[in-house]
Structure formats: structure tokens, C-alpha cells
Image (cartoon, rainbow, N blue to C red):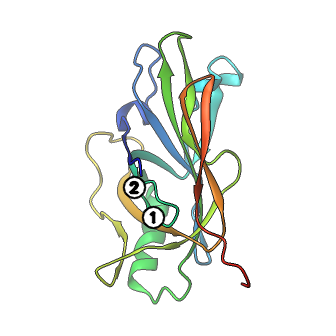
Amino acid sequence: MAITSINCDIIQGFNYQKDAQTLIGHITKLQIGDTEYEPDLTVQDPTKIGNDDGKVAVVGVLSNIYWQGGHAEAVLFNCRVSTENKKASILLQHTSLSKTDVVFSFVVYDYDPDKKEYYKSFHTTDTPLNGLVAKHGGQLDMNIDTNQAIDVVSPKNYDFSLGVMPKEEEQQIEYAVAQDANFSKKWGVTVVGK
């Protein structure tokens, strides 16, 4: 299986500059159990420059995302979240997380030097993925840093990481290596009789 490991530029993700062409990523939706995270960080969608300024509200700004590529492999991501979403994460970690269902969507943008514009390179389109919080060594693969990150000081933001295993249903993750060169990969396996 081909491994996907993408490091995104946190500073560019929060404070977009037109003259920088680095990878940018966002967590656009996240729900864990009954807790729906607020899309309360306003950032730039780099594909919409000039279209009503292209500002979008997201749950988190990605620092990295990793997937081993297998249908049953977890998607692991690290992102920065707001103070409110930090509080939600701490509450989830320190109370009994009776429901580990996860609904999430993400997008990573890359720059096409030939067309001189950004495109979606790794994403879930407009359809969120359904999964479960992954476990690592018997522990849920979820962590929030209670100390504020210092590379971007405004807005206040905190490191958050999550691993998500697919539910027993076939879903799609989209890839592109250029604006006009894209394909889909399966995530999750449908179990007959469920």
C-alpha cells in the first residue's frame, strides 16, 4: 500500500500569504460521539482567492495527516483547534467516552506550479467520513495539548491529534497530483449482513 504522509504549513494555514506556495490543510468537520466541534477558526480557502475573499470557517488547521493506505487503516491527523474546542477535547478525554463514533472531513491544498494556483490534493469532497476513534496500545488515539501553541499566537490555538479507524462501510478519499490529475481510494470495507 502507498503511504500518505503530508506535513502542512501551520503559519500559512492561519495567515495565508499569496506569495507562499506551501501545503495547507483544514479539518472542516469533526464530531466525536455526541460532541460536535465548532468550526470557529476563520481561514483562507486558497482555491477561492478573489471570490468574496474566500474565507471559510473550519474546526482545525492541519499540521499533518497520515494514512498507510489500506482500506482498514486509520487516518491519523494533528491539527490546531480553538480554546472552545480544546475544552471540548479535555471533557471528552476525562469523562467516559461511551460513544467513539467519529464523523469528520478534511482537505489538503497543494500548489500547481504550471497553472499557478492551488487545488485540492487530498480530501473527502463534501461527504464526511464515518469512523471510530482508533486505539493504540489499549488507549484511545486522541490527545489535546493544554498549553497554547507559540508559533501562531492569534487566535489562541492548541495541538490536537486524533486517529480514526473506518466503520464497516466502503467510503472514498480523494487524491490529486495536479489540478487535472485526480483519483479516488477506498477507505473502509462493507461487511455483508450488517
| In the depicted structure, whether residue 43 falls above or below residue 46 | below
Residue 141 in sight in this render: yes
Q: Check the picture and name the quadrant holding the C terminus.
A: bottom right
Label 2 neighbour load within 10 Å: few <14, some 14-19, many 20+: some
What whole-number distance in Å separates the C-alpha atoms at marks 2 and 1? 6 Å
Label 1 neighbour load within 10 Å: few <14, some 14-19, many 20+: some
For the point 49% across and 62% down, the residue is 84
Helix, strand or loop for disc 1:
loop
Q: Is residue 164 left or right of residue 10?
A: right
Q: Nearer the viewer, residue 123 or 99?
A: 123
The x and y percentages for residue 147 are 26, 60
Label 2–label 1 contact, CB within 8 A: yes
Disc number at residue 13? none
Q: Nearer the viewer, residue 192 or 53?
A: 192
For the point 47% across and 73% down, the residue is 133
The x and y percentages for residue 186 are 60, 55
Residue 43 in sight in this render: no
Give whichever of discs 2 and 1 has the lower sequence position. Answer: 2
Task: Specify the amino acid type for callout 2.
Answer: Gln
Task: Specify the amino acid type for callout 1.
Answer: Glu
| In the depicted structure, whether residue 95 falls above or below residue 3 | below
The x and y percentages for residue 154 are 39, 41
| In the depicted structure, whether residue 156 falls above or below residue 42 | below
Instruction: Name the residue carrying label 2.
Output: 68
Helix, strand or loop for disc 2:
loop
| In the depicted structure, whether residue 47 falls above or below residue 75 | above
